[in-house]
Amino acid sequence: MIDLGLGHPAGDLLPQEIMRRAAALHLGQGEASLLQYGEQQGDARFRLALASFLTRRHALPVGLDDLFVTCGASMGLDLICTLYTRPGDLVFVEEPSYFLALDILADHGLEVVSVPTDVDGLVVDALEGELRRRRPALLYTIPTHQNPSSATLPLARRQRLIQLSQEHGFLIVADEAYDLLSYEGATPPSLASLAAGGTVLSVGSFSKILAPGLRLGWVQAAPQHIKRLARCGLVTSGGGLNPLISGLVGVALEQGWQDEQLDHLKAVYRTRMAALSQALQRELGDLVTYVEPAGGYFFWLQLPSGMDATELMTVAAAHKVGFRPGARFSSRGGLRNHLRLSVSHHDGDTLAEGVRRLRQAILAMH
């Protein structure tokens, strides 16, 4: 079975040597504080190293006081929902959107309304139309290399989105897990860096740029939001989140090892993107449509009219290939003739073989 839907890295891309060196260097210094309750906002040394890394990579200033440490992006989103919403509150999401984020919103009993997207991401004009009728507590967006569509919101739309949040009094939760995985051109500015009015909480993660098992991430936001996050019951009871791992990753940041790993991952994924694109053109060019991604993990395919990707999964399994069906990324059960493929887990030859099998499955249904 070749599962082209897997959205996590293969074992040979995980930075075992970096983490061994970071542990030897940091734990070798005899700092018992790594095993103590942490600072509520997160270790200051780590936040300083992270701020320097983000400033360099985004070419926009980020300060250590702009950052709050989390146990990954999912935990960051969950904590924001806990503090800023109540069951029954309205939340806007993109159509499509990250399916596991939709699960988190459902856990909090939130009413989810989807806003259309196009090849450039969230359609801000459509959002403005929705805002004339109702005001959400939050808008959840993946503005850069979106999961699953890989769309990236242009600067003009980012600025207009922030302006609307200020005019209508709602918060933007920007899931920016993929924003450092740009394979063409510069990394777009994070939404929080553009939002002087403090209406954006940008959620970041080391899951895609270092290793998902670290369960380490951050929220970048204005001071009032950072203080609220740091003073919540979860943090004041348990101390700062993930102090041991953030200490080790801080060493990787200081030593430049995170930069090396990120550059390595971008080179690998850029090559895999090209390999998957070539395979799609060769095998499925007459059967599917898609927009070439400029970063991230994913290809978002539209199947022939009337074909249901959920039904295709059963046929595909018989051909020993898997994917993620489009309906999983819809908050309203739509997108049934779409599917998501990922480049993160398989090398180019395996991706090409998977696409060859997918063609056989589609032809068997077509």
Image (spheres, rainbow, N blue to C red):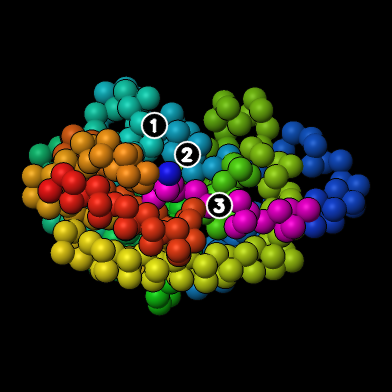
| Label located before the other in sequence (3 or 2) | 3
| Label located before the other in sequence (1 or 3) | 3
**Residue 66 lies in quadrant:** bottom right
Q: Which residue is mark 1?
A: 104
Residue 104, horizontal then vertical, whole percent: 39, 31
Would you call the spot at circle 3 few (<14 residues within 10 Å), some (14-19), or many (20 or more)?
few
Question: Which label was assigned to residue 10?
Answer: 3
Residue ranking furthest to the bottom: 185
Of residues 259 and 164, the one drawn nearer to the viewer in this rendering:
259
Of residues 53 and 340, the one drawn nearer to the viewer in this rendering:
340
Confirm whether the magenta stretch covers residue 304: no
Amino acid residing under circle 3? Ala
Q: Secondary structure at mark 3?
A: loop
**Residue 106 lies in quadrant:** top left
Amino acid residing under circle 2? Ser
- The residue depicted at 18 percent of the width and 46 percent of the height is 364
Region rendered in magenta = 2-20
The label nearer to you, 3 versus 2, is 3
Contact, mark 2 vs mark 1 (Cβ under 8 Å): yes
